[in-house]
Amino acid sequence: MVKPVTGEEIIKAVQYDVLGKLPNPFIFDDGSEVKTVEDWEKRRKEIFETAVTLQYGPQPPKPEVFEVEDLYEFSARVLNYRITAGTKEKQASFIMQIFKPEGAKKFPVVVCGDGCWKYANDKEYLNAMLDNGIGFVLFNRLELANDTRHKGRGNGQLYKVYPDLDMGALMCWAWGFMRCVDALETFDFIDKSCIAFTGHSRGAKTAMLAGVLDERAHIVNPNETNCGACSCYRIHMTQICEDGVERRSETLKDLGTNYDFWIGSGMQEYKEREADLPFDAHYLKALVAPRKLCVWEAASDAWTNTIGSWQTSMAATEVFKLYGKEENLVWYYRTGTHFHQPLDIQQLVKVIKWHMNGEPLDDTFFKTPFKQPELIYDWKCPEK
């Protein structure tokens, strides 16, 4: 049975290569320093060009056409809609389902693009939200862009709508999150003061990117993203997992070789020279500030770069401090391997209750399953 880690050293790094220190987000491209929140908002635009546009490709513009079609009610608790959006000449469409908590007239929601995976319809997984008065909004991101490695980049509906954009599939999938929120804003039964994004693995990369792009997401909850979102390009590690097996982390070379169509084409230049990247995962995480970012990992999911994710979360917290909101970057590790467990959703529910009702978080957060190494940065939040 999986459970939150307690802070004990249950995994051990046997190889831990730091390719370089994490770059300082508080330095403008011209060398001047960020000193205020107002400065950071300007710096944010510079960081966006690398942490988002370089990493994932260009973002599609706001749709010229947007329609929500009510399809049918599978039951009183499951609503089905078709969303159609795009240019005047061509649109993409996909199905969005809303699972409603029983008896709720208005409710917060968790949005997820993992409709292509069976666990998203698992009863225990769903009830972790529904039994707490939280709705679940589900769509299948593969309706927008194919996840077919043998076909490569540019396959799927959204590429036909925006044929001139050299965007990775992750950007296409994140577009789906944003269109779901567009639809949710038209419904009076949605509590728009609490919209959370979540997803797992490649779906977690998507949820993370969508949370950066769409500030209407109050809580961004990527679950085990692996390389390309929340881990750390500058750390390569191998660890002994809970089962005694030695496993290594995913690198940019792995991602850029096997799933190059997910990410921006410009990332190929850095496949074996990550230390030269003008950003790392802490920049992407910092772009969520001051909203709530909840980074969930599993102790024996070595591919996610277990220590690297912690390093970049610690670094990004310095940006949250600039807003006086360091508590809004929440991280948690559980035992076990790569999966989106009901326990992970239960942890997200705790954050939603904190966000909505002020219920304090318990002591299952902010504990690592490894001995914490020295931080790989030496800069800090500017003095206020």
Image (tube, rainbow, N blue to C red):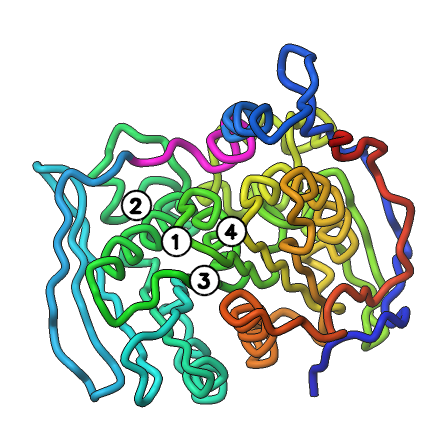
Q: Secondary structure at mark 1?
A: loop
Which quarter of the picture shows residue 30?
Answer: top right
Residue in the foreground of this view, choosing between 305 and 30: 30
In the picture, which quadrant includes the N terminus? bottom right
Q: CA distance from mark 3 to mark 2?
A: 28 Å
Please state the horizontal and vertical placement of residue 163, each as a whole percent of the image: 24, 33
Residue in the foreground of this view, choosing between 123 and 129: 129
N-terminal of the pair, mark 4 or mark 1, is 1
Q: CA distance from mark 1 to mark 2?
A: 8 Å
Please state the horizontal and vertical placement of residue 9, each as a whole percent of the image: 90, 69
Q: Secondary structure at mark 3?
A: strand
N-terminal of the pair, mark 3 or mark 2, is 2
Q: Amino acid at mark 4?
A: Met
Q: Are marks 1 and 2 in contact (CB under 8 Å)?
A: yes
Residue that numbered label 3 is attached to? 196
Residue that numbered label 4 is attached to? 208
241 falls in the magenta region: no
Residue that numbered label 1 is attached to? 148
Mark identifier at residue 155: 2
In the picture, which quadrant includes the C terminus? top right
* In the image: residue 316, left or right of residue 176: right
Q: Amino acid at mark 2?
A: Asn
Q: Are marks 4 and 2 in contact (CB under 8 Å)?
A: no
N-terminal of the pair, mark 4 or mark 2, is 2
